[in-house]
């Protein structure tokens, strides 16, 4: 359907060294405990109460999460690091929500900076950077969870300090599960479905994280952690596992490979899912480029390396600062016994039928991600320029093709709120340049996404249908340093005046007063139940299928 170039794994591997800078000495202290500590598995958050709408039958679960300062020892021979965690944990607890079961999550700010929460990948209007939760305030976020099953994540999005807050630990996994789908496809599940939240930081001589509050360019980090543990190991059985890989770093793009101890070649694995959930088909690869905020679901089959250790490596790419000795991420210790064959069969040739937007020739809008007068800009504009931050008005339900252009010696992972999009093409901004890729990677070609990675000197074209909701949403670079200074903008999915579809409530203004943060004085069961009934009464996210069909009919299936 799409006339896009596709890079083979070998071609991609050959291109990546073109992006690599010379390596420099590490800043952080030496870590003397490589692979000695086990991989932590974040606890699954449990709701405190629920409410079921008697008319619709939809249940809403209530959760309460406290954001608070904590100390955590990361270097056993040094002092503690000062962090900020959801529920006092870094990373935060994992949400595992059955698709279609709604949630209200109350985030309470009990630390000394402002915060804002974004459920990244959800088609809600949360995460507006100026929708702040001040210390000693809370805000209730309402999530419909009606999209296809997928790996989302929640993280801070506060204007001007997103990088500081996420660098300190405000990030966690939020997974929409479809148990019937996983069972029908016989994918690894249960104990064989494991989140891997990757981070990259720098540390002081005392073992604390570095203070990056004055950084204006990037924080690549020289010390890698997974699920909050530096260079951990995981004991696995010699069978298939599903790993949900999230890059939660501030500025570091990871280029992941696997290598067994007794092999000199990379071990192949399969990519089965992306930001938007399962892909059309599994894609075999020996390397995976994952930029900030991207999620990839991979299946690794350890059956051929029983009794061996397999190391996950990172190879430097793009223009990220490369540090000597910073090339390992974690280790898998493969046993010799398989305790369950559930989800251990051959991967299906076809996974799901993607709901692809209908392509058209015209480029509807070009957005240039660059640097102007010391500021990170989009089309020369900054988010601080409130009068000019809306860069595109898109009629609700229409499909648009956007061209995203990078360059000037930097890479930019571009995140567009609200929508899943198709990466149609990638090319060099100038064919005479020695850097820049000329195609879509095979795993991108089989996926829908909400982050598109612009390598230095690259132009990427994406196609999305701007539905089902109208309202004002953000798009920005997910290098959080760039985002804070000031590479963010907004687009307006405009209302259709004669649409005529009966909607009780529409979330159009992300700063609407009745949903703003308020002072926290505690939570009672009666008050929470009243709040759940209130959100349920809005019917704001009800009948998604009906709305999408009505939009298609309105536009003639554009």
Image: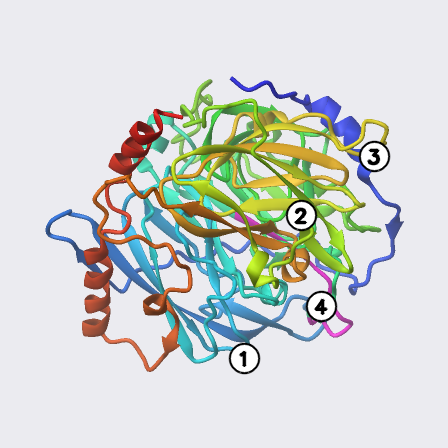
Q: At 43% from the left edge and 45% from the top edge, which residue is drawn?
A: 493
Which residue is outermost to the bottom? 521
Q: Secondary structure at mark 3?
A: helix
Q: Position of residue 3 (x, y in %)?
A: 59, 18
| 450 lies left or right of 46 | right
Q: Position of residue 287 (x, y in %)?
A: 67, 32
Give the mark, 3 or 4, whose residue is nearer the N terminus: 3
* Alpha carbons under labels 1 and 4: distance apart: 17 Å
In the picture of the structure, the residue carrying the numbered disc 4 is 212
Provide the secondary structure element on which disc 2 rests.
loop
Kindly report the distance in space between the C-alpha atoms of the residues bearing marks 2 and 4.
Answer: 27 Å
The one of 472 and 169 positioned closer to us in this rendering: 472
Label of residue 18 in the image: 3
Residue position marked by numbered label 1 in the rendering: 112
Q: Residues within 10 Å of mark 4 (few under 14, many from 20)?
A: some
Q: Residue 379: which disc?
A: 2
Q: Earlier in the sequence, mark 2 or mark 1?
A: 1
Q: Nearer the viewer, residue 358 or 440?
A: 358
Q: Which residues are magenta?
A: 196-208
Q: Are marks 2 and 1 in contact (CB under 8 Å)?
A: no
Task: Report the Cα–Cα distance between label 1 and label 3.
Answer: 43 Å
The residue mark sitting in front, 2 or 1, is 2
Q: Earlier in the sequence, mark 1 or mark 4?
A: 1
């Amino acid at each position: 359907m799409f006339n896009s170039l596709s890079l083979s794994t070998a071609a991609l591997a050959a291109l990546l060294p073109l992006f690599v800078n010379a390596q420099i000495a590490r800043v952080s202290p030496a870590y003397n405990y490589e692979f000695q500590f086990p991989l932590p598995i974040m606890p699954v958050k449990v709701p405190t109460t629920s409410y079921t709408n008697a008319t619709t039958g939809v249940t809403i679960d209530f959760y309460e999460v406290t954001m608070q300062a904590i100390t955590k020892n990361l270097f056993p021979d040094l002092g503690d690091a000062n962090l900020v965690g959801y529920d006092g944990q870094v990373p935060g607890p994992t949400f595992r929500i059955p698709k279609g079961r709604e949630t209200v999550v109350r985030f309470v700010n009990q630390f000394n900076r402002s915060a804002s929460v974004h459920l990244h990948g959800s088609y809600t209007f949360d995460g507006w950077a100026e929708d702040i939760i001040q210390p000693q305030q809370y805000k209730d976020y309402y999530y419909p969870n009606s999209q296809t099953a997928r790996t989302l994540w929640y993280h801070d999005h506060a204007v001007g300090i997103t990088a500081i807050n996420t660098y300190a630990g405000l990030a966690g996994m939020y997974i929409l599960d479809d148990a019937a789908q996983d069972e029908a496809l016989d994918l690894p599940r249960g104990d064989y479905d494991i989140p891997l939240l990757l981070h990259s930081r720098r540390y002081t001589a005392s073992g604390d994280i570095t203070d990056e509050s004055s950084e204006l360019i990037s924080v690549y980090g020289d010390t890698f952690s997974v699920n909050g543990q530096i260079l951990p190991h995981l004991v696995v059985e010699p069978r298939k596992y599903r790993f949900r890989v999230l890059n939660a770093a501030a500025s570091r793009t990871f280029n992941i490979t696997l290598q067994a101890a007794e092999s000199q070649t990379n071990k192949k694995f399969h990519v089965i899912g992306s930001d938007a959930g399962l892909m059309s088909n599994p894609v075999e690869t020996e390397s995976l480029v994952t930029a900030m905020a991207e999620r990839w679901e991979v299946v690794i089959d350890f059956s051929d390396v029983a009794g061996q250790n397999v190391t996950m490596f990172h190879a430097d790419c793009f223009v990220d600062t490369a540090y000597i000795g910073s090339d390992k991420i974690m280790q898998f210790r493969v046993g010799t016994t398989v305790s369950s064959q559930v989800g251990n069969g051959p991967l299906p040739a076809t996974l799901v039928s993607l709901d692809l937007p209908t392509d058209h020739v015209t480029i509807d809008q070009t957005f240039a991600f660059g640097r102007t007068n010391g500021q990170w800009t989009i089309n020369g504009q900054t988010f601080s320029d409130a009068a000019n931050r809306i860069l595109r008005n898109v009629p609700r339900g229409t499909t648009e093709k956007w061209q995203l252009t990078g360059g000037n010696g930097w890479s930019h992972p571009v995140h567009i709120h609200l929508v899943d999009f198709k990466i149609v093409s990638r090319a060099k901004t100038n064919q005479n340049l020695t850097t820049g890729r000329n195609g879509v990677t095979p795993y991108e070609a089989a996926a829908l996404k909400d982050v598109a990675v612009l390598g230095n000197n690259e132009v990427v074209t994406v196609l999305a249908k701007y539905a089902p909701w109208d309202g004002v949403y953000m798009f920005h670079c997910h290098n959080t340093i760039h985002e804070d200074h000031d590479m963010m903008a907004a687009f307006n999915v405009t209302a259709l005046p004669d649409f005529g579809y009966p909607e009780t409530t529409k979330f159009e203004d992300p700063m609407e007063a009745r949903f703003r943060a308020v002072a926290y004085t505690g939570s009672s069961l009666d008050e929470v139940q009243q709040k759940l009934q209130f959100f349920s009464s809005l019917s704001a996210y009800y009948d998604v299928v009906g709305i999408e069909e009505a939009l298609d009919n309105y536009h003639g299936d554009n």
